[in-house]
Image (cartoon, grey):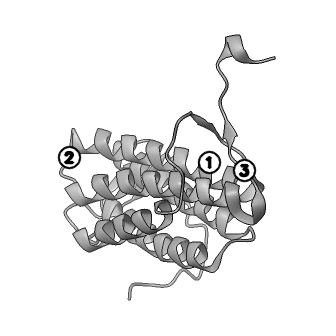
Amino acid sequence: MGNRLSKIYTRTGDKGTTGLGDGARVDKDSLRVEAYGTVDELNSAVGLVLAAELPEAIRTCLTRTQHELFDLGGELCMPGYTLVPDAYIDGLESALDGFNEDLPPLKDFILPGGSEAAARCHLARTIARRAERRVISLAHNETVNAASIRYLNRLSDLLFVISRVLARHDGGSEVLWVHGDKRT
């Protein structure tokens, strides 16, 4: 294990740069920092979902996801390093299939909401989509583990399905979008 932080501020970033895991210094608004920073934001949003009342299967899944997101952030922070295996994607797909199994087919668009936990999960889903876009932007300019893009894509799908499950949890329901000319 690397060094532990005993002092939180170092002043090394006061001029707009930050250190990567390999020791290189880059601008704080570089594509790489944007990518792992958005993954960190996503991890925080998943933590916000976990702060709500959840079924145990969802809690277990999202807790595992937080650890995997931390791995992904570490991978993005260290160019050329791989921490996200295909097995992470397989795990997301398995969870996705399991949670989706009892949901009715979609016939309408769903608005974020339905319950506090579902709304939090929808927020995490949208951050996952942004993280995916940031990693794709990085991949246009630097080498990125292709599994990390697939992981974020699958995770956003999983968060959508979990949002649907949470909206229905304890007798709740999803909020369906109604086309403008049909709203009263």
Spatial CA distance of label 3 from label 1 is: 17 Å
Q: Please give left or right for residue 107 compared with residue 153 in the image.
A: right
| Above or below, 28 relative to 165 | above
Residue most toward the right? 184
Q: Amino acid at mark 2?
A: Glu
- Which picture quadrant has residue 89? bottom left
Residue, disc 3 = 173
Q: Quick one: quadrant of the N terminus?
A: bottom left
Among numbered discs 1 and 2, the one appearing first in the sequence: 1
- Which picture quadrant has residue 57? bottom right
Q: Residue at x 38, y 40 (%)?
A: 133
Among numbered discs 3 and 2, the one appearing first in the sequence: 2
Q: Residue at x 28, y 72 (%)?
A: 83
Spatial CA distance of label 1 from label 2 is: 28 Å
Q: Residue at x 69, y 10 (%)?
A: 181
Q: Quick one: quadrant of the C terminus?
A: top right
Q: Please give left or right for residue 162 compared with residue 177 in the image.
A: left
Helix, strand or loop at mark 2:
loop
Q: Amino acid at mark 3?
A: Ser
Among numbered discs 3 and 1, the one appearing first in the sequence: 1
Residue, disc 2 = 142
| Above or below, 107 relative to 65 | above
Q: Residues within 10 Å of mark 2 (few under 14, many from 20)?
A: some
Q: Nearer the viewer, mark 3 or mark 2?
A: 3
Residue 66 x, y percent position in the rendering: 50, 71
Q: Residues within 10 Å of mark 3 (few under 14, many from 20)?
A: some
Q: Which mark is residue 123?
A: 1
Viewer-nearest residue: 42 or 162? 162
Viewer-nearest residue: 62 or 47? 62
Residue 92 x, y percent position in the rendering: 38, 66
